[in-house]
Image (cartoon, rainbow, N blue to C red):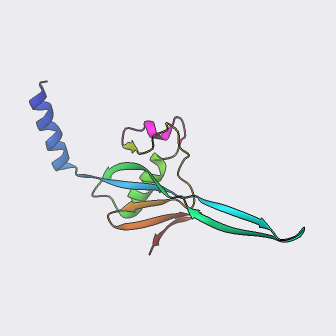
Amino acid sequence: MNKKLDALLDTLEDVKNPKENVSVIHFSSAMKTRRLDASTVIHSEVKDNSRLVAFVEVDKSLSIEEKLDIAYVKTNSIDEAWWDNKEVTAMFPDKSCRSTSIGDMVLIGKVKYKCESAGWHVVL
């Protein structure tokens, strides 16, 4: 096929099956430890090291739960590195990043969802 026909077919596919990107944000906080004496240790969170790690392309017509599940699966390394998935646009300069896990977030539209041990919760 020629380039014009390919472009028209891509546009038709976008109209028939609209897509959207959801953002995947990995969260980590540094812990500061201070020892007062031999038996007393104080731990405090120092800094929020949240960072955008990926955009995941999903069908716009899916439910929120389905979009969250796809974003989670697509940013987990199972058989290969997750950033090699064709629906994923990695947003980190070094070519490695951990998988999405508990405490991480997915942004859909203007709403953030936090990954919990069982499901997702809206972050207010």
Q: Would you say residue 59 sits in the magenta stretch?
A: no
Q: Position of residue 100 (x, y in %)?
A: 53, 52
| Figure disc tally | 0
Position of 1 with respect to 61 (left or right) is left
x, y percent for residue 118? 57, 64
- Foreground pick, 97 / 63: 97
Q: Is residue 111 left or right of residue 100?
A: left
Q: Using the image, determine if residue 94 lies above or below residue 108.
A: above
**Position of residue 59 in the picture relative to residue 77 (left or right):** left
Magenta-drawn stretch, dominant element (helix, strand or loop): loop
Q: Is residue 11 above or below residue 107?
A: above
Residue beneath the point at 53% across and 41% down: 77
Residue placed farthest to the bottom in the image?
Answer: 124
Q: Is residue 102 above or below residue 57?
A: below
Residue 7 image-quadrant placement: top left
Boundaries of the magenta span: 77-87
Kindly indicate the quadrant of the structure image that contains residue 40. bottom right
At which x and y percent is residue 106? 43, 59
Q: Residue furthest top?
A: 1
